[in-house]
Image: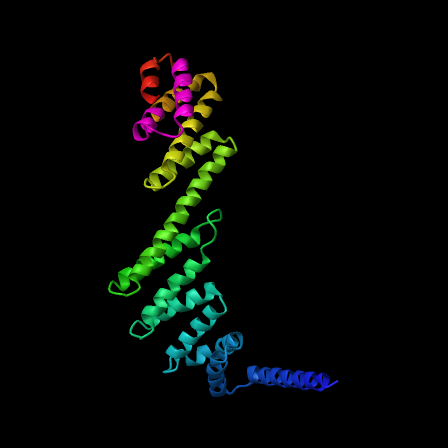
């Protein structure tokens, strides 16, 4: 029975608080709104702080308060994990106030927003590429920053994600038996990321895709495409003579050699 009065009091306080905030939003007292921006931010009420900032920023942008309010605006959006808006505000801050004590941190956090927006490898990687670019620009802009090692580590992480995305795209075409598209995708992946940990697998998949594409081609195109398969086999086996795909690669070589009437006995012995 004692709980009900407490609930009623609590609800009344909430209603009063909401009413006061609504009045504040409609108020023309910009100095009061400015002070409340800081109060709400310090209390962790970031959305209320942002809503007030949207109203007062045009008035204070060219004043002494503009820098601090711009910083609070970026920080508040970052706190609520609105990385698109936060990244925009951080970058604007870094460009507008390059001499500020917060300029370096703003540029770094702008890059971090792109980093947080980077999705899983199977999704579109536009934000991943943007994150790499942002960290690179940051290191160029602040070559002596203590955050340089962190930026390099994050760039490497993002590059690995791009490698995995590239690998998955080529693998997908292969699994769907779209062999022509697979050879193009796998070739592009190997060209763009020559040092990838997936290199051996990518090269074998490309070889097998070329072979399957040749098999399924019309007669007029088969000689040309089997020859491409044979050339690719030599490149593959030269780079990976002890490949784990040796049995399958040898089978491709033998069948391709039979079609082209090429003696495979010597090469077969070497690969075995």
Image-based side of 80 in relation to 92, left or right: right
Residue ID at (56%, 84%): 24
Q: Looking at the figure, which quarter contains the N terminus?
A: bottom right
Examine the image and state in which quarter residue 224 appears: top left
Residue 263 falls in image quadrant: top left
Image location of residue 61, percent across then percent down:
40, 78
52 and 78: which one is in front?
78
Answer with left or right where residue 62 lies relative to residue 14: left
Residue 60 position, x and y percent, is 42, 81
Magenta-drawn segment: 233-259
Looking at the image, which is closer to me, 216 or 27? Answer: 216
Q: Is residue 2 rendered magenta in the image? A: no
For the point 46% across and 40% down, which residue is it?
Answer: 169
Determine if residue 194 is in view: yes
Name the dominant secondary structure of the magenta segment: helix
Question: In this orientation, does residue 223 appear?
Answer: no
Write the residue at 46% across / 48% down.
121
Could you tell me how many numbered marks the image carries? 0
Task: Verify whether residue 252 appears in magenta.
Answer: yes
Closer to us: 26 or 265? 265
Q: Residue furthest right?
A: 1
Q: From the viewer's perspective, tell me whether residue 214 is left or right of residue 266.
A: right
- Residue 240, horizontal then vertical, whole percent: 33, 30
Whole-percent x and y of residue 237? 33, 27
Quadrant in which the C terminus is drawn: top left
């Amino acid at each position: 029975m004692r709980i009900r009065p407490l609930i009623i009091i609590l609800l009344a306080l909430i209603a009063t608080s909401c009413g006061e905030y609504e009045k504040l939003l409609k108020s023309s007292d910009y100095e009061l709104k400015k002070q409340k921006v800081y109060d709400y931010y310090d209390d962790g009420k970031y959305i209320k702080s942002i809503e007030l900032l949207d109203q007062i920023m045009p008035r204070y942008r060219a004043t002494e308060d503009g820098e601090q309010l711009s910083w609070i605006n970026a920080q508040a959006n970052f706190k609520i994990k609105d990385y698109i808006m936060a990244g925009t505000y951080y970058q604007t801050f870094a460009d507008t106030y390059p001499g500020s004590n917060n300029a370096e941190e703003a540029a770094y956090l702008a890059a971090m927003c792109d980093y947080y927006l980077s999705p899983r490898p199977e999704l579109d990687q536009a934000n991943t590429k943007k994150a790499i670019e942002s960290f690179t620009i940051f290191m160029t802009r602040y070559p002596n920053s203590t955050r340089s090692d962190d930026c390099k580590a994050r760039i490497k992480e993002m590059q690995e994600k791009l490698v995995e995305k590239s690998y998955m795209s080529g693998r997908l075409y292969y699994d769907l038996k779209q062999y022509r598209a697979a050879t193009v995708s796998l070739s592009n992946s190997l060209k763009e990321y020559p040092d990838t940990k997936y290199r051996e697998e990518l090269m074998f998949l490309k070889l097998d895709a070329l072979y399957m594409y040749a098999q399924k081609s019309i007669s007029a195109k088969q000689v040309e495409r089997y020859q491409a398969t044979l050339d690719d086999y030599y490149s593959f086996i030269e780079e990976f003579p002890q490949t784990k795909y040796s049995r399958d690669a040898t089978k491709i070589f033998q069948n391709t050699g039979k079609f082209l009437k090429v003696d495979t006995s010597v090469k077969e012995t070497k690969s075995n």
